[in-house]
Image: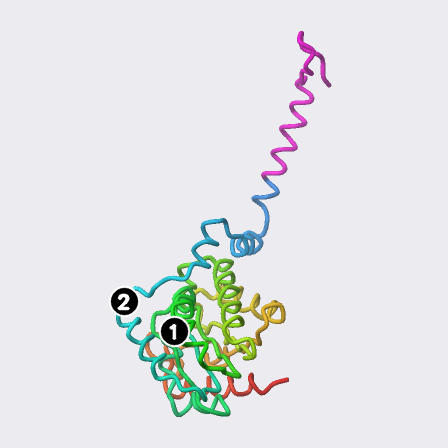
Amino acid sequence: MTSNTPDGEPRHTASTTSIVYAAVTLTIVAALCLPSEGRAQNARSVCDKTDTQFAVTATVPDNADALRKYERNVSSLTSDVSTVMLGDSLVEAWPKELSGALGAGPVANLGVGRDRIQNTLWFIEHERERLRQIKPKRIIVLVGTNNIYLDKPCGVMQSYRKLFGEIRSLWPSGKIYSIHILPRGEQMKGAAENIGYVNSELSRTSRELGIRTIDASGVACGMTTPCANYKSDLLHLTPPGYEALTKITRDGIGSP
């Protein structure tokens, strides 16, 4: 119930105040009682302005060796390159005799260890004019594992969106294949929820992003460790791991 104050404004009685208080309390309790999975999902999917700025800003690598590798990689490009590989150490270490099977012609491995997606963006922006000189039919991307502990998953997705847009602008006739972030860590549980979220979002929005995703979790020995496909750091791959990854990637490229 309400009555009027001397200046004509409504005054809440104790009864009305109690109702309002109860409603607010129920709202707070309802929010706190949301399943933890739901709260985690919301945290993964919402980025503020700073998260977004960090995610989409091209960033120079944190060491000079990476810059030297960029220069060496671009300088070795030939006009007949049919397939380009972009990414971090998992791409850089891909054995040449195996990566060569991923294209119908010359394959250019442009991977650089420790790269985050923002570093790959910087490479493309910095070397755009020289990269325009090649016309690859396929662009294979494996990057993101170095983002997964630093960026919110929603930020990782924004980084990917920016990267795929830049690749599409650079090589409009090339087809982009994005290999999912690989499982990592003891029992392959390292950042598993965040990796799962990002990979799921990549698959869900692949058509919108103009890419084809490749689920390479089959390299992870049924998600158990030790795993013969992984080195002792449970991040990088052994020769058998690259053999498995090459087969998965070839199958993914060849699928309808």
Q: Is residue 11 magenta?
A: yes
Q: As drawn, which residue projects farthest toward the top?
A: 6
Q: Residue at x 38, y 77 (%)?
A: 111
Q: CA distance from mark 2 to mark 1?
A: 14 Å
Residue beneath label 1, please? Answer: 88
In the picture provided, is 166 more to the left or to the right than 90? right
Q: Residue at x 45, y 53 (%)?
A: 53
Of the image marks 2 and 1, the number of the one nearer the N terminus = 2
Q: Is residue 182 magenta?
A: no
Quarter assignment of residue 213: bottom right
Residue beneath label 2, please? Answer: 63
For mark 2, does the 10 Å Cα neighbourhood hold few (<14), some (14 to 19), or many (20 or more) residues? Answer: few
For mark 1, does the 10 Å Cα neighbourhood hold few (<14), some (14 to 19), or many (20 or more) residues? Answer: many
In the picture provided, is 210 more to the left or to the right than 246? right
Instruction: Name which residue type carries label 1.
Output: Asp
Mark toward the viewer: 2 or 1: 2
The span shown in magenta is 1-28
Q: Vertically, is 95 above or below 201?
A: below
Residue 169, given in percent of the width and then of the height, sits at 52, 70
Residue 178, given in percent of the width and then of the height, sits at 51, 75
Instruction: Name which residue type carries label 2.
Output: Asn
Provide the secondary structure element on which disc 2 rests. Answer: loop
